[in-house]
Amino acid sequence: METGTKPNHPPDPHITVGRDEYLAAIDVNKRMVDHFPDTWQTPRPIVFLMACESAVTTVATLNDFVTAWNGAGAAAIVGTEAVVDSELAAACAAEIVQTLWNGATLGEAFSGFRKKLLEGGNPLGFLFQAIGDVDLVLH
C-alpha cells in the first residue's frame, strides 16, 4: 500500500496489485460489487492495512481505504494513524492475529498489544486502530 506519491503512480493512496495496476479506495466497493457479490457473506475478513497513515481520515481523504473496506463488508479494518516503523507494524499484526487465534476478541487483542508495549515504556501501540466490532472473534 502506498500512501505517498511516486512518479508514474496515481496521486491518491493506492494498493499496488500487479505490475502497473493499482487499486484506489474508490475502486474497492466497485470491485466487490462487480466481481465478488457473494464473497463476504460469512465469514467476513479482517483487513490489515499496516502502511503508514493507512487508517487516517481527514477532509482530504473522506473516501479512504477504511471507509471503502468497511463498505465492502469487512468485519474489521486494522490500520495506522501515523508514520510507523515497519517492524512495529509487523509485530502488531502478528500479535493481533496470534491473540485472535488463541480465542480473544479483537478488543482484547488490541488492549493486550498496547499494554505489552506500555509496560516496556513504548506508547506507540496507540498508533494502531481497529475499526469494527471489538467483540469480534475468529471461528
Image (tube, helix red, strand yellow):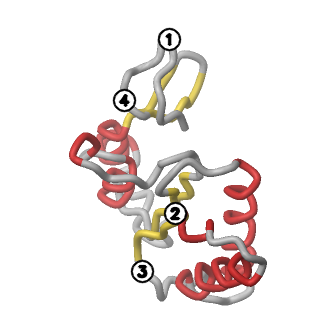
Q: How far apart are marks 1 and 2 (CA)?
A: 28 Å
Amino acid type of the residue tagged 1 in the rendering: Pro
Marked residue nearer the N-terminal end (4 or 2): 4
Q: Is residue 13 above or below residue 99?
A: above
In this rendering, position of residue 62 left or right of residue 3: left
- Circle 1 sits in a helix, a strand or a loop, which is it? loop
| Distance between the alpha carbons at the discs numbered 4 and 2 | 20 Å
The numbered disc on residue 7 is 1
Image side of residue 33 versus residue 93, left or right: left
Q: Nearer the viewer, mark 1 or mark 2?
A: 1
Q: Which of marks 1 and 3 is in front?
A: 1
Q: Which of marks 4 and 3 is in front?
A: 4
Identity, as a three-letter code, of the amino acid under mark 4: Asp
* Residue plotted at (63% across, 72% down): 123
Say which label, 2 or 3, has the lower sequence index. Answer: 2
Closer to the N terminus: mark 1 or mark 3?
1
Is the Cβ of the residue at disc 4 closer than 8 Å to that at disc 2? no
Give yes or no for contact between labels 1 and 2 (Cβ–Cβ under 8 Å): no
Residue 117 point in image, percent of width and height? 71, 76
Q: Which residue in the protein does label 3 denote?
A: 133
In this view, 42 is above or below 88: below
- Residue 78's disc is 2
Q: Quadrant of residue 126?
A: bottom right
User: Residue 34 shows which numbered tag?
Assistant: none
How far from the left and from the top, in percent, is residue 9? 47, 17
